[in-house]
Image (cartoon, rainbow, N blue to C red):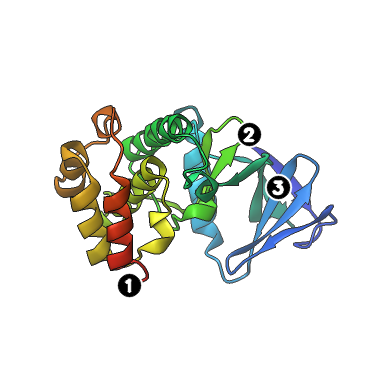
């Protein structure tokens, strides 16, 4: 992986794109530069980037780091390609055709499977970290929040609720945030393949979850009304 050497942690780039609790992102042409804040464990972030680089060919559908950024020889961040994208919740709508949402769910599930195969869990998984490009292809961002290990029940919940949001055209990710309520929604909306993945340690994401499957709109609305915001 190439290394960009800078004189300062505040590079002279085009403009600030985002400032968060963990990092600041700058825009420069077709690249984004992510500079971590001082209180972040930079050693773990660099190790994460090295692992991703080693498995680059296996992580299609993930916005990958391109170069490491160093200041005075010390790692401070990384660059990545800038995509013309919008957050995935723009697809959680009946205004987007079911066919488009269905194809998006297949692509996203395939990316989940590639990550799951490597034992990678996204530790900050939410709608702002899953983007849709102009062709309707989902891309998972914030790759330095990936962590290795067995998949937690929480992460399985998030994966399934994301897929159910796409299939139903309803933003279940933001409406329902209590783990008990999420379990209830998966039980009520999921088919047998989804429930196998959710409840069994060796469950896998499969196309059976999505094939010819569309949650009942009335049931979705009823569940959201019952559990939304809890």
Label pair 2/3, CB-CB below 8 angstroms: no
Task: Give the total of numbered labels.
Answer: 3
Residue furthest to the front in view is 218
Quadrant the C terminus occupies: bottom left
Rate crowding at label 2 as few (under 14), some (14 to 19) or many (20 or more) other CA atoms within 10 Å: few
Relative placement, left or right, of 168 versus 151 is right
Q: Residue at x 51, y 32 (%)?
A: 56
In terms of depth relative to the viewer, which is nearer, 6 or 148? Answer: 148
Residue 64 in view (yes/no): no
Q: Name the quarter where the N terminus is drawn.
A: top right
Q: Secondary structure at mark 1?
A: loop
**Mark 1 nearby-residue class (10 Å; few <14, some 14–19, many ≥20):** few
Which of the two discs, 1 and 3, sits closer to the camera? 1
Image disc number at residue 96: none
Disc 1 to disc 3, C-alpha distance: 36 Å
How far apart, in angstroms, are the residues tagged by discs 2 and 1?
A: 34 Å
Residues at circles 2 and 1 in contact by the CB criterion of under 8 Å: no
**In-image side of 83 versus 113 (left or right):** right
In the image, what residue occupies the spot 29% across and 43% down? 215
- Residue 95 location (% of width, % of height): 52, 42
| Residue corresponding to mark 1 | 230
Q: Secondary structure at mark 3?
A: strand
Percent x, y for residue 122?
41, 51
Mark 3 — residue?
A: 32
Q: Which residue is mark 2?
A: 134
Residue at coordinates 49% horizontally, 57% vertically from top-left? 44
Is residue 119 positioned above or below 9 on the image? above
Q: Residue sitting at 50 percent across and 34 percent down? A: 61
Q: Estimate the spatial distance between the alpha carbons at disc 2 and disc 3, rounded to whole Å.
A: 18 Å
Front-most of 141 and 86? 86
């Amino acid at each position: 992986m190439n290394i960009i050497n800078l004189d300062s942690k505040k590079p002279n780039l085009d403009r600030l794109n985002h400032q968060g609790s963990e990092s600041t992102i700058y825009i420069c042409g077709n690249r984004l530069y992510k500079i971590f804040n001082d209180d972040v464990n930079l050693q773990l972030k660099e190790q994460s980037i090295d692992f991703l680089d080693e498995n680059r060919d296996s992580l299609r559908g993930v916005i990958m780091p391109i170069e490491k950024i160093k200041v005075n020889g010390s790692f401070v961040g990384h660059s990545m390609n800038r995509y013309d994208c919008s957050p995935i919740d723009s697809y959680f709508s009946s205004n987007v055709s079911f066919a488009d949402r269905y194809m998006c769910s297949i692509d996203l599930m395939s990316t989940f499977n590639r990550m799951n195969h490597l034992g990678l869990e996204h530790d900050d998984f939410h709608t702002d970290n899953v983007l849709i490009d102009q062709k309707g292809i989902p891309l998972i961002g914030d790759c330095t929040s990936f962590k290795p290990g067995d998949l937690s029940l929480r992460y399985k919940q998030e994966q399934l609720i994301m897929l159910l949001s796409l299939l139903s055209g309803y933003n279940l990710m933001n409406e329902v945030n209590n783990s008990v309520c999420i379990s209830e929604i998966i039980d009520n909306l999921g088919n047998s393949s989804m429930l196998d993945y959710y409840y069994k340690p060796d469950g896998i994401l499969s196309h059976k979850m999505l094939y010819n499957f569309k949650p009942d709109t009335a049931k979705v609305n009823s569940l959201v009304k019952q559990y939304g915001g809890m």
